[in-house]
Image: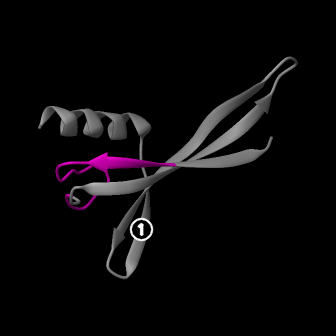
Amino acid sequence: MATTSSSARVSFKHPFQLPGMDRPYPAGSYEVETDLETLDTVSTVIYHRVATRILLTRPGITEALTIDPKDLEAALLQDVSAA
């Protein structure tokens, strides 16, 4: 099995907090990394999500917090509805 990674940026218009965060983080854009494992089958390649991390940057520090993608999706939906 091979592993690959992808990254995307998400944007929050309001402060947000995900499970596992010690405090709310300010509105802004954040990089999200996803590690995928390839599962080879007879006819196709299937990708299985292994881990998802959000990169939290403060002056002088970048922290990678492992998150549940469903929690991120819920926070983004809450951010949109708070407008």
- At a point 37% along the width and 47% down the height, the residue shown is 10
Residue 67: % across, % down: 42, 47
Horizontal relation, residue 47 to residue 58: left or right: right
Q: Residue at x 17, y 50 (%)?
A: 14
Q: Residue furthest top?
A: 43
Q: Quadrant of the N terminus?
A: top right
Residue 19 in view here: no
Question: What sort of colour scheme is used for the picture?
Answer: one colour
- Residue annotated with mark 1: 63
Specify the quadrant that holds the C terminus. Answer: top left
Badge count:
1
Q: Main secondary structure of the magenta part?
A: loop
Q: Residues within 10 Å of mark 1 (few under 14, many from 20)?
A: few
Extreme residue toward the left, this view: 83
Mark 1 secondary-structure assignment? strand
Question: Where does residue 34 sit, x and y in percent of width and height?
Answer: 55, 46
Residue 33 picture location, percent across and down: 52, 51
Q: Pick out the residue farthest to the bottom.
A: 60
Segment tinted magenta in the rendering: 8-24
Image quadrant where residue 47 sits: top right
Residue 69, image x and y in percent? Answer: 42, 38
Check if residue 18 falls in the magenta segment: yes
- The residue closer to the viewer here, 57 or 11, is 11
16 is higher (above) or lower (below) than 70: below
Residue 81 in the magenta stretch? The answer is no
Residue 21 against residue 1 in the figure, above or below = below
Left or right, 79 with reference to 76:
left
Residue 65 appears in the rendering: yes
Q: Amino acid at mark 1?
A: Glu
